[in-house]
Amino acid sequence: MSPSTWITVRLTIELAALSTLLLLLLGTPLAWWLARTRSAIKPLAASLVAMPLVLPPSVIGFYLLLLMGPQGPVGQFTQWLGLGRLPFTF
């Protein structure tokens, strides 16, 4: 394999490891809270958690690109902070 292929494989492994770690750190407490709470916002939180099961990943990805793109609110905020554009960066 060429060096550029190994760079792509390494980036994929790094991104998968980071995503797994973040989901474990955020998802476990959220799942515990959803299982135990009787809060009024539980239906909203449960709907947001179930959204990836209902919407195709391409639709969610499109909305994330709109949200984090240069014209989106998150994208404008990160550019204002000096962090640059978020999409397509590690």
Image (spheres, helix red, strand yellow):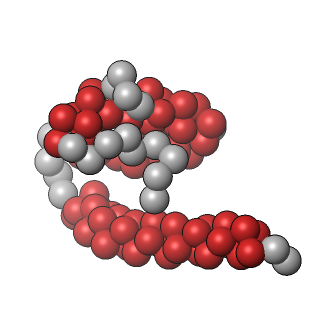
Q: How far across and how far down the image is residue 78, in percent?
A: 25, 40
Q: In which quadrant is the C terminus drawn?
A: bottom left
Can you tell which quarter of the image residue 57 is in? top right
Q: Residue furthest top?
A: 71
Seen from the viewer's position, the closer of residues 90 and 42 is 90
Residue appearing at x 17%, y 52% in the figure: 38
Q: How far across and how far down the image is residue 16, in percent?
A: 54, 69
Q: Is residue 16 visible?
A: no
Residue appearing at x 37%, y 40% in the figure: 85
Q: Residue furthest front?
A: 3
Can you tell which quarter of the image residue 30 is in? bottom left
Seen from the viewer's position, the closer of residues 6 and 60 is 6
Seen from the viewer's position, the closer of residues 21 and 55 is 21
Q: How far across and how far down the image is residue 18, in percent?
A: 44, 71
Residue appearing at x 46%, y 52% in the figure: 89
Q: In which quadrant is the N terminus drawn?
A: bottom right
